[in-house]
Amino acid sequence: MVKKQGSDINKIVEFLSPNERKILSFLGEGSIEEVVQHSGLDKTSVLRALEFLSNKGVVEIKSSKEEIVELGINGLLYVRKGLPERRLASLIAEKKSIDLNKAKKQSGLSENEFKAALGVLKKKALINLINGKIMLAGSKGEITKHNLEEKFLESLPRKLDSLEDEEKFAFENLKSRKNILDVIDKKIVEFKVTKLGSELISKGLDEKINEMIEAVSPNLIKTAGWKGKKFRRYDLTGNVPRIYGGKRHFVNQAVEYGKKIWLEMGFKEMTGSLVQSGFWNFDALFTAQDHPVRELQDTFFIEKEAKLPGGEIVENVGKAHEGKIEGSKGWQESWKEEDAKKVLLRTHTTCLSARTLVEIAERKEFPAKYFALGKCFRNETVDWSHGFEFNQTEGIVVDENANFRQLLGYLIEFFKKMGYDKIRIRPAYFPYTEPSLEIDVFHPIHKKWVELGGAGMFRPEVTIPIFGRHVPVLAWGPGFDRIIMEFFEIKDLREMYKNDLNKLREMKIWDK
Amino acid sequence: MTILTLSKKELESKIGNIDDKLRNKIDMFGTPIDNEDENEISIEIFPNRPDLLSLQGFTRGLLAFLGKGKGIVEYKVETPEKDFKVIIDKSVKKVRPYTACAIVKGLKFDNNTIDEIIDIQEKLHGSYGRNRKKLAIGIYPLEKIKLPIKFLARKPEDIKFQPLEFPKEINGRQILSQHPTGREYGKLLEGYNEYPIFEDANNEILSMPPIINSEKTGKISKETTDVFIECSGFNNEFLKKTLNMIVTALADLGGKIYAMEIEDKVEGKYLSPNLNAEKMEFQIDYINKNLGLELSEKEIASLFSKMGIGFDGVKEKCYALVPSYRTDIIHKIDLVEEIAIAYGYDNFKPEIPEIAGVGEESKIDILKGKVAEVLIGLGLLEVSSYHLSTKEKQFKKINVKEFKDKIIPVIDSKTENNILRASLLASSIQILSENSDASYPQKIFEMGRIFSYNDECETGIGESERLCISLCHEKANFTELKQVLDYLMKMLDLNYEINETENPSFIDGRVGEIIVDGKSIGVIGEVNLTVLKNNRIMMPVASLEISIENI
């Protein structure tokens, strides 16, 4: 860094870029506009050169903000055509009394404009509303008078802090209405030549200074033209224009990492359709046909009829529901194929596990370990903590000797690798697992346990229809979005797929 | 999610001071605390445990879990007194075939307990009763009715009584159209010519299930000491369980349970309720194998006792005695979870077994990873958008006019996004449109699924894995994008050709079909200026969208 107090003016000179040198002699003019005019440089170059000069202690830059009131989109329109209340007022002044609906039509105002106009005129006691009729309340002169708001609009643009009391009142009234006014922050930059700067200017620049080497070029190297000359010194601390590289979407960065953990633990990936039948998403997973999750208000259905798989699986699943497999009472209700044929957007990746189990059973290839990490859907309104699409990470371990302690082992290992050390496992309920559990992690800021997702061992009513007998299967399906939000410090779920390019460019990368 | 909200004072009088240790115990019982303030505590009850949906049921279960109970609680059922009888008439069999009934005497009601009873009823209706679809519960003051009781069906016009909270007598049809509860649940009686009613020996109508009780005979007051309870519906097993949950809660409140004789004109006579525990056979090994533990018979017996379950038998032939109000023990695997909860989920030692397995990523994900790597190297930014979108964004805004048979709607979406996306190009254009304030150049790509009707697929909906690239800046053009495509294809070791084509989203003469192995895999071109203007994009855009699953 160049020493601002360094009195070695000659050294400073070696740092000056051509643009800095160019504007130096015009600094005495005092304003940026004049420097632009005299130097022939554009404003951005002048501002940049001034910034560099300020770093060297040649000038002092003072920047301040000013709030400017301008016309908004509607404001521009209203200055031309008149405010809605003006248009309505003219109509009423002319008719003295008019039917509400007629007034709406004849004024040519939109629903919202009409409402606003009516409100304003009522508030000013210029009209009365009686039996669906608008009546002129004041005199005709009063209602046609040019009002405060109109005068104010015509006076724009204005500095916000320069408004008189009356104008402030008008400003507040108009600001609350849609797009009439815009308040814009304007940055004002001023500069002052320092003592050092004055010395530098009065000393003037030696002609020789122009012989300093600016850019390095192939020619310069070839001709050895640099020998015996000085290179212009750079200000290494100055800001540079920002650039952005390509990168993966942050959700996919996290998903890639999650997948890597499962792959390292020896799991194979399952993939499959987002559109599934009720059979795979619910029935094969022993979810009763009258379970609330199977209603329109929870799940996205599509008006189609799915084909059910061949073989005995459909019949076996039906039996499990009806309590016709050995040792189980089932749901004690009759099971209908028609509900299984419904087409829907998968509500969990567990449907992939169900399908994979069938393949494993056919090939008799277990012990086996599989995982999935993908999108699921639920019919939800959207707010900061809810969305209609979410990511889930799914896993199954099929093994004759699988047990509950192993289930805890896999889950704790995964979440440890995801960065969660303080984990709690507590009882939970899912129709298709028994025992079932929920994983909580401790939230260090809120100082409470936060739910991450469920797991369990598939019930015999799930495994028997597939394997013909009960084979223990450990299964889990925690949500993945909470982990992503926490890492990237996202407070609102809606940010996940907003694709704000500025934000995506600035976001840190997943570095676990 | 069903939440049981209890007065903290009342609960503490039964289970002791609620501190952090007890809070953790409550969570570990499988009834997580949802919310808590000075006066109230809200507890989440999972759908498999409707028997916990009352202060009585919850404290009974929790006290046992805390080691303060006596295992399975036995409830005595007194024999029926004179006229303690319910006749199920043939007429009701088509409409609402079953009812489970009981009488409980010697209760003391105050405003609190009356509210509590109504609350239990409503909670059971809402959860286990699936919003009264599966069953409905009625509780009546015995002093206002004359036994025996008849359950029958009658034409709606012939059913006349004053429903609860209503000023006058109206008929069955009017109840469905005029009474708020009738309007809410009326659809449950839709399509029936006759509606079910309970009627007493004076021919007074007590109620019209599953809708409403009578104001005269169906309202408990502070004077009430004895009550008649019925659960009516379609599956007798559910009804019996529900009745058992209610009578045991009332017995815990100090009541005495009396049986009633049910005279079903079709299926015969029997006594109700039956509060005998159910015997379920299991093996000690079965529990230990599933949990990875080595518990002895004695340990298992004492763990069952913490869950309010009894134990009987010897090593080879063991029985769990399951209380008559439990609905969730439908297989011996459910006993395994009972033991796990009693043992304490926090007491298990996690273990990772040595199971051989080689991690294997799916082929499509490997490919997507490689494509992303190439494009990132070229400075492109990946975006990610929703699979659900709107007709406007998916078709109209990219100038696609013929889209009627391409729309795949989802039913009753709660947001404006109500169709499955048909292209990634549309999402890409939308993103550029929303980012006109971000600095240029904007070079983005997305990989994801799009949807189309396809009768060869199991669900009738086909899914295709796509890549979309859009370049948007002052000088964006076909050549620049073709350079990107060219580089990508080279890296993937693929040969391709571009054939001229027509596409409404692109400029005529500047759009081509990308052909690999003689098959079209997508389009590339400069985006139509109408599309740009429609989307308020003030910079040229070159885009491509290709299928990546078959390359």
Image: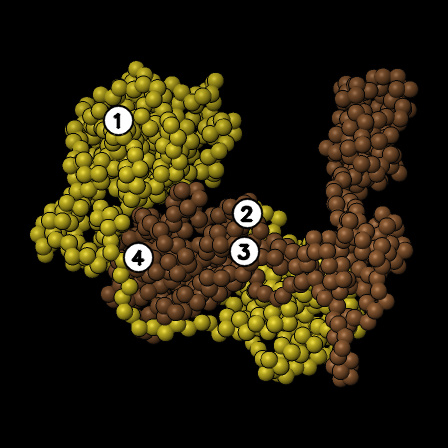
* Spot occupied by residue B114 in the image (x, y as percentages of width and height): 34, 23
Marks 1/2: CA distance?
Answer: 41 Å
Closer mark to the observer between disc 1 and disc 3: 1
Chain at numbered mark 1? B
Q: Spot the residue most to the left.
A: B314
Q: Is residue B336 left or right of residue B371?
A: left
Marks 4/1: CA distance?
Answer: 36 Å
Which residue matches tag 3? A302
Q: Amino acid at mark 3?
A: Ile
Which residue matches tag 2? A492
Residue A413, picture quadrant: bottom left
Q: Amino acid at mark 2?
A: Asp
Label 3 near label 1: C-beta < 8 Å? no
Label 3 near label 4: C-beta < 8 Å? no
Asked if B29 appears above or below A133 in the picture, the reply is: below
Which residue matches tag 4? A408
Marks 4/3: CA distance?
Answer: 37 Å
Chain at numbered mark 3? A
Which residue matches tag 1? B13
**Residue at x 62% of width, y 77% of height:** B488
Q: Which tint was used for chain A?
A: brown
**Residue at x 83% of width, y 29% of height:** A149
Q: Which tint was used for chain B?
A: yellow
Which mark is on residue A270? none
**Residue at x 53% of width, y 62% of height:** A252
Q: Are marks 1 and 2 on the same chain?
A: no
Q: Quick one: SS at disc 1?
A: helix
- Crowding around mark 2 (Cα neighbors within 10 Å: few <14, some 14 to 19, many 20+) is few
Marks 4/2: CA distance?
Answer: 30 Å
Q: Quick one: SS at disc 3?
A: strand
**Residue at x 56% of width, y 76% of height:** B550
